[in-house]
Image (cartoon, rainbow, N blue to C red):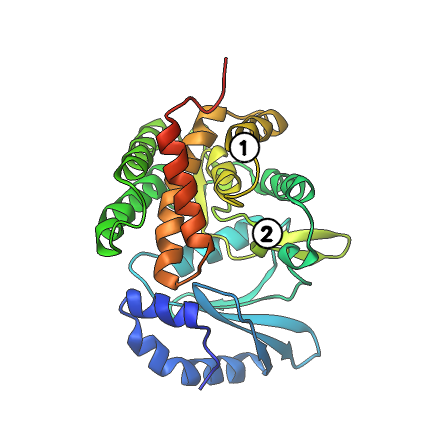
Amino acid sequence: MPDVPETVRAKAVDLGATAWLENLPELVASSAARWGLRLGASFKDPTEAYVVEVTRNDGTPAVLKLLIPRPGSDAADEITFLREAGGEACARLLAYDESLGVLLLERLGPALSDLGLPLSRRLPILCDLAVAVWRPTAADLPTGAARADRMSRYIRAKWRALGEPCGRAAVESALAAGESRRRAHSPARAVLVHGDIHQWNAMRAGDGFKLVDPDGYAAEPECDLGVLLREDPTEGDPRERCAWLAERTGTDPRAIWEWGLLDRVATGLTLTVAGLQPVAAEMLAAADAIASAGTEPFRP
């Protein structure tokens, strides 16, 4: 039986994918045989997939990723995103089976999170990776409006089910922000966005970094920056970070702020389901603090 991380197991159970867990050994073995792979060590920190180091027949190191099945088209979206990105600022897609949710990817170096860099050095790296990904796209990807709607529905479904782990004010603020971003979606401003840029999804590649694990959307660029705003919830003033992100990228600070509000609560609940503490509680506590302050994200 593959060494499945508890976070992945908990996510699979929450999504009703227990059959996938039971069939995972066979799926790993058949994928390895299909693509001529020698299996190595599995990764310990994924939350949405079983991921294992592999070596191809020609000696090339790679990564085999098997996504937890869920409603929607997550595997198709990730594959589409990676094909659109073409290895620029993101891992190269080497092979895939969309129907099984299996991807063979370029193997990269250690994660940015392993390097112990302070936020002041991490944030410019991640922000610049986001900018490098953005480009007009006609790909069949979910929109920013769909992302806002999906996250809002998740918040409504999970907040009570998890025993209300953050205050009602934080939930209401997040849902209001989600509705604002849903209404604001414009195909004219939509670009290719990763959707989950953080230090665990940025891996060393030569002298720089590349991103892994994209959600894949056609959305306003502020969607990616909202993720950078939600992360590291115990560090710094979120209003100052919002202003910095907007100034560096020439984007709308209010849109960044609203995406951050929505993403902070939705991700905090997701991490609660996965049992990733204390970061889940810290993220939701930050949402409570912002909701309690009731102030504008930036001053005129």
Q: Quadrant of the N terminus?
A: bottom left
Assess disc 2: are there few (<14), some (14-19) or many (≥20) residues with their C-alpha within 10 Å of its C-alpha: many
* Residue projecting furthest to the top: 300
Q: Percent from the top left, x then y, of residue 157?
A: 23, 51
Q: Is residue 73 above or below residue 266?
A: below
- Which of the labelled discs sits on residue 199, or is there none? 2
Q: Amino acid at mark 1?
A: Asp
174, 34: nearer the viewer: 174
288, 258: nearer the viewer: 288
Residue shown at 22%/51% (left/top)? 160
Residue shown at 61%/59% (left/top)? 92
154, 239: nearer the viewer: 239
Q: CA distance from mark 2 to mark 1?
A: 19 Å
Q: Which residue is mark 1?
A: 237
Looking at the image, tell me whether mark 2 or mark 1 is earlier in sequence order: 2
Q: Percent from the top left, x then y, of residue 114?
A: 66, 59
How many numbered marks are there? 2
Q: Percent from the top left, x then y, of residue 118?
A: 67, 46
SS label for mark 2: helix
Residue 180 seen in the figure: yes
Assess disc 1: are there few (<14), some (14-19) or many (≥20) residues with their C-alpha within 10 Å of its C-alpha: few
Q: Nearer the viewer, mark 2 or mark 1?
A: 1
SS label for mark 1: loop
Q: Percent from the top left, x then y, of residue 53?
A: 60, 75
Residue shown at 50%/41% (left/top)? 192
Residue 66 placement: quadrant: bottom left
Left or right, 299 with reference to 111: left
Q: Amino acid at mark 2?
A: Gln
* Residue projecting furthest to the right: 207
Residue 292 placement: quadrant: top left
